[in-house]
Amino acid sequence: MNNLIPLVLGMAAVTYGPRLIPFLLMSNREVPKRMDAFLKCIPAAAIGALIIPGVFSATPDMPMAAISGMAFTMIFGLWKGGIIIPVLGSVAVTYFVLFCGA
Amino acid sequence: MTREVQDACKAGIPIFIGYIPAAIAFGILSKGCGVTLLECFLFSAAVFAGASQFIALNLLMAGMGPGGIILTTLLVNFRHFLMSAYLSTRIGRIAKRYIFLIAFGVTDEVFSVLSFKRGQLSMTFVIIVQISAYSAWVGGTIAGYIMGGFLPEILTKSMGVALYALLLAILLPEIKASVTALILAVASGLLNILLIKLDILPNGWTIIVCILFIAFAGSFFVFTKVQEKNYE
């Protein structure tokens, strides 16, 4: 295969650009209220689309495994909160379901 | 250790755990595609964007030229523009000098962790979270390339759920605090399912359309609430 380094650098540039430009544009200004309301809605909207429907094919051979793991995160997270236990627990539950199903 | 460093490590560990198996997979796949170790390392170290790296390998194998692959990468990663736009309102002022560094590490998961961190974001917190993500991604890539599938397959598969669980765990406190976050997230997910089913948008753009549309719709709701508060 040919040298891939120019390709990698090109990809790096078009990835870094969109990540950087908003910081350059916005860091000096007061954001209008309307715009601020829009920006405030971005995190929840982004997370929704990042989880659904991707999670349903996270364990493609057995979608129930991933769903069980997520159910653990949901229940534990709502009950006790935190990040590490909900995440590690979801991996453990998914592993258990995959292991039993295999 | 200060409270802040502890918090940052707690937030960074789940990202680390989630990135390792994906990075190992990228390393293994690169090797299979005939990519050299240096190129593979550069992919993860310089691009630092999961999905688009996998897509690039696929396109390379399909024989697409660099121009097409770079354009696809731009499309796939453009959602980070919106994420940076949000983060800049919370980081821009406190850390103007470091924006070039911070911007490099705006991945989906880093963005999610940072955006729902309560209170002021500090440089220490941002940098520790980003280093956790970056070290896992680059380290995992190299480990995968050199050692191949050294973790049992069933474990790697299970670890793939970590990233989704992380996103959910971040969102849950918001959902408990206000129903708005739940409505936005569910609406966005449903719209994403619909857009993927319709299959009219290029790879990566369904998420962008979801963010734009749902955040725009949501802004009316949030904006009215802000105004009501001002009039009180």
Image: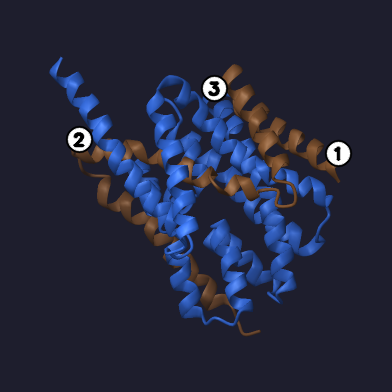
Q: Position of residue B56 (x, y in %)?
A: 57, 70
For mark 1, what is the residue? A100
Q: Quadrant of residue B168?
A: top right
Q: Badges 2 and 1: C-beta atoms under 8 Å apart?
A: no
Inspect the image, locate mark 3, and give the three-letter code of the amino acid beneath it: Arg
**Residue found 35% across the figure and 37% down from its top:** A41
Colour chain B is painted in: blue
Q: Badge 3 sits on which subunit?
A: B
Inspect the image, locate mark 2, and give the three-letter code of the amino acid beneath it: Lys
Q: Position of residue B93 (x, y in %)?
A: 30, 38
Task: Identify whether B58 is placed above or below A76.
Answer: below
Q: Secondary structure at mark 2?
A: helix
**Residue found 42% across the figure and 39% down from its top:** B187
Residue A33 can be seen in this image: yes
**Residue found 33% across the figure and 47% down from its top:** B213
Q: Badge 1 sits on which subunit?
A: A
Question: Which of the image's four quarters has the C terminus of chain B?
Answer: top left
For mark 3, what is the residue? B3
Inspect the image, locate mark 1, and give the three-letter code of the amino acid beneath it: Cys
Question: Which of B77/B205 is in front?
Answer: B205
Residue B90 can be seen in this image: no
